[in-house]
Image (spheres, helix red, strand yellow):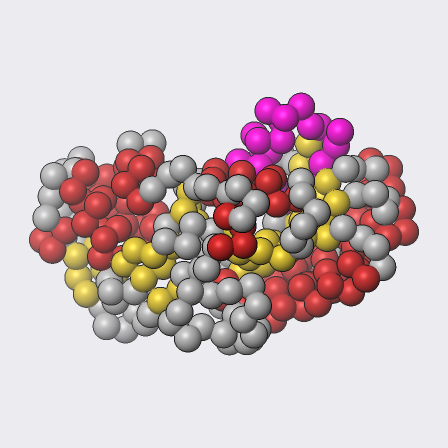
Amino acid sequence: MKAIIFGANGQDGHYLTQLLLKNNIEVIAVSRSGNFIKTNITNYEEVSLLIKNSQPNFIFHLAANSTTWHSALFENHQTIATGTLNILEAVKEFSPHSKVFISGSGLQFLNTGNPIKETDPFVANDAYSIGRIQSVYAARYFRTLGIKVYVGYFFNHDSPLRSERHVTKKISEAAKRIAAGSNEKLEIGDISVIKEWSFAGDIVQGIWLFINQDKIFEANISSGIGYSIKEWVETCFGLIGKNFEDYIIHNQNFISAHKILISDNTLIKSIGYLPKINLKDLAKMLINK
């Protein structure tokens, strides 16, 4: 069996590659960076040639610039939305047996502060969500043409592979440096913000479970459990034996787009998904890596 991963160089691509190899599946890893195949997901000819020649059993579209910045508008539209169309049209024409997974985001839904359901309305509140929303409608259209295409909506999930651009890693790396003797101050925004803190390795287990069934085709792949940023900071600094209040500066100019961003994961649990790594386990992983 074969699988193509577009976006293999990200954290999800890394853990998914490991999982597939353990299941004796040949991985065709594609990424614009790193030592991977350089097929351009925004170019239909290149994508269709790869799919036609490889005849994969599975295709995973994980490629994106993980940011909501407006400056990435065109990049993410091409990678996410156009990339989705390229994959699905190529599958329809050359490899209709392939199962396709498209990654989505909790950010593309209307957020009322309640756990977000797959049936909640979409709202394009940022440049990133535009491409995500368009890719879902493309998936729904190609599903009517007989293509088995799955959309998994992700919420916050992390691993040691994250960069310090993400608050989870920013906090854990600061804690490690302080444990080693640094006198730095960690500047962060509203620590009452609540989000999910899943492990990327658990999330890809959910992807694999999801794409290997035919009952549901859109689902939150998530823990459904929310913790505040304060709880994450307390956990990380607790692991190094420090009082976090001695090391942070509250910057009121750092404003989160959401006070609460958590999911209702009832649907994915109905097919047997159960994350294993909790908040403290994840903190230990990042602090002790």
x 83%, y 49%: residue: 91
20 sits to left or right of 149: left
In this rendered view, identify the residue nearer to me: 186 or 208.
Answer: 208
Q: In which image quadrant can residue 217 be found?
A: bottom right
Residue sitting at x 37%, y 50%:
197
Location of residue 85 with respect to 25 vertically, above or below: below
* Observer-nearest of 5 and 194: 194
**Total numbered badges shown on the rendered structure:** 0
Residue 9 lies in the magenta-colored region: yes
Out of 52 and 247, give the one closest to the viewer. 52
* Residue interval drawn in magenta: 1-26
Looking at the image, the residue that sits furthest to the front is 270
Q: Is residue 196 above or below residue 19?
A: below
Q: Quadrant of the C terminus?
A: top left
Q: For residue 232, say whether it is visible.
A: yes
Q: Position of residue 190 (x, y in %)?
A: 25, 67
Could you say where residue 127 lies in the image, as x and y percent from the top left?
Answer: 55, 71
Question: Which of the 4 image quadrants contains residue 137?
Answer: bottom right
Indicate the position of residue 231 as horizontal and vertical percent values.
Answer: 23, 53
Tell me which residue sits at (10%, 48%) in the image.
243
Furthest residue toward right: 93
Residue positioned 67% across, 43% down in the render: 213
Q: Nearer the viewer, residue 67 or 114?
A: 114
Describe residue 240's horizontal placement relative to residue 11 as left or right.
Answer: left
Magenta span has 250? no
Screen quadrant of the N terminus: top right
Q: Is residue 70 visible?
A: no
Q: In the drawing, does residue 201 fall left or right of residue 1? A: left
Res. 253 image quadrant: bottom left
- Residue 32 image point, x, y percent: 64, 46
